[in-house]
Image (cartoon, rainbow, N blue to C red):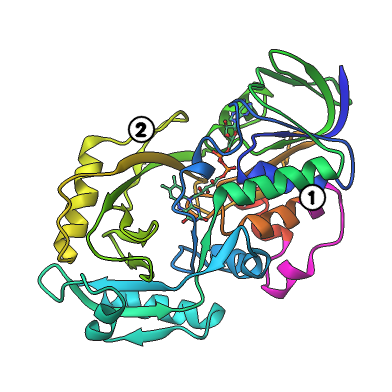
Amino acid sequence: MQQVDFFVIGAGIAGLSAAARLARHGKTMVCEAEEAPGVHSSGRSAAFAHFDMDGWLVRALTAASIPLLDAPGARPHPALFLALEQQEQALDRLESAYREWSPHVRRLSVAEAQEQVPILREGDGGIVGALFDRHGRKLDAHTLLETHRKALIAAGGSLTFKAPVISLGHDGNRWIVDTPGASYAARIVVNAAGAWVDEVAVLGSVAPVGIRPLRRTVITFDTDIDVSGWPFTKTVGPGFYIEPEGSHRLLASPMDEGESTPGDAQPEEEDVALAAWRVEQATTLTIPRLASKWAGLRSFTPDRLPICGFDLQAPGFFWLAGQGGFGLQTSPAMALAAEALATNGEWPDELRAVGVGPSNLSLDRLA
Ligand SMILES: Cc1cc2nc3c(=O)[nH]c(=O)nc-3n(C[C@H](O)[C@H](O)[C@H](O)COP(=O)(O)OP(=O)(O)OC[C@H]3O[C@@H](n4cnc5c(N)ncnc54)[C@H](O)[C@@H]3O)c2cc1C
């Protein structure tokens, strides 16, 4: 049986980014059920960092993370937020939230928004207002994952694939973890299993937190227009987002939240149709055929805010979960928090600066 200090379950962005930091403090093993990192949510994301997110905590974690999201995992890319009819107040609220974190944000008239994205239609299902942030960040999930994988290995950590945790128990001293090919004794288990975190908890006889995996659908389609200079463009309420994928391809989502269970999420036909319809309603585009479609799970705690910290009842069982639709853009801050809390270290200045303390992320919140 291999002895480790930190046994991290899940090689998505949460598990890998935290493991890369923990490996500096002790022997660290990451085990992943799939044959590569990021097969589930992390590899299916729209991969954009912005502040149109529910809750102060998510925006604060995003603000702490953005300076740490550097090339090649992130590059500057503007964001445009749209108000459809009845969404003007939501645009006002977003503008005030934005001013706290990204003061360069600017209100645009419909005509100015159309200069950025010429296909936008005005009124009657189209847009009535817009907000522009030239300081957004386009992320590259695979590069981020690869950077963390290399940092983990460089710090002496290990990573194993096709290794689902199938049994988990505490012997009074250490966590005993079994995968089909190997067994481990770990001082600390980090539960970063995304949509599966509650299933992992139950395996270890730890009470679940009530994670809700919600399915989100993405389509891509080709256009005749060069879209490479367009911003990430998103409605502030129900609607859609689009973002360029190269010069003549757009990615779109209807921002759906279909109830789901942990698993390999697949797009439902009605959500695919909804994505195309919502884009066509608000723009001059028609989408005769799709280039691709997929779905992924965004997993939320009951209050839709992330958790990072030890379980209150199970010593050595560490939760890193509930990253919802913001897991990439908050990963640097969450990894810093996980490092500090799991090693009993100093609370990071980056988090202190945005007013986030351990209690904001603690499971106490959900008790
Ligand atoms: C369509 C879509 C768009 C999104 N857009 C954005 C965006 O623009 N910006 C942003 O910041 N975020 C976005 N997100 C959210 C982001 O992708 C997630 O918050 C993030 O990927 C969650 O990372 P994770 O590591 O917790 O989960 P995952 O990436 O799902 O990783 C968990 C891993 O745990 C593994 N695992 C599970 N059970 C076990 C077990 N028993 N043993 C071993 N391994 C196990 C799984 O195989 C999986 O690889 C989006 C998500 C979706 C679906």
Left of 351 or right of it: where is 244?
A: left
Left of 355 or right of it: where is 304?
A: left
* Residue found 58% across the figure and 52% down from its top: 306
The image position of residue 269, as x and y in percent, is 22, 36
The image position of residue 100, as x and y in percent, is 54, 81
View quadrant of ligand 1: top right
The span shown in magenta is 339-357
Q: Mark 2 falls on what kind of element? A: loop
C-alpha separation, residue under disc 1 versus residue under disc 2: 33 Å
Tag on residue 76? Answer: none
Indicate the quadrant containing the N terminus: top left, top right, bottom left or bottom right. top right
Left of 236 or right of it: where is 72?
A: right
Tag on residue 266? Answer: 2
Q: Is residue 350 covered in magenta? A: yes
What residue is shown with label 1? Answer: 21
Q: Is residue 73 covered in magenta? A: no
Residue 34 or 263: which is nearer the viewer? 34
| Depicted 93 relative to depicted 103: above or below | above
User: Tag 2: residue type?
Assistant: Gln
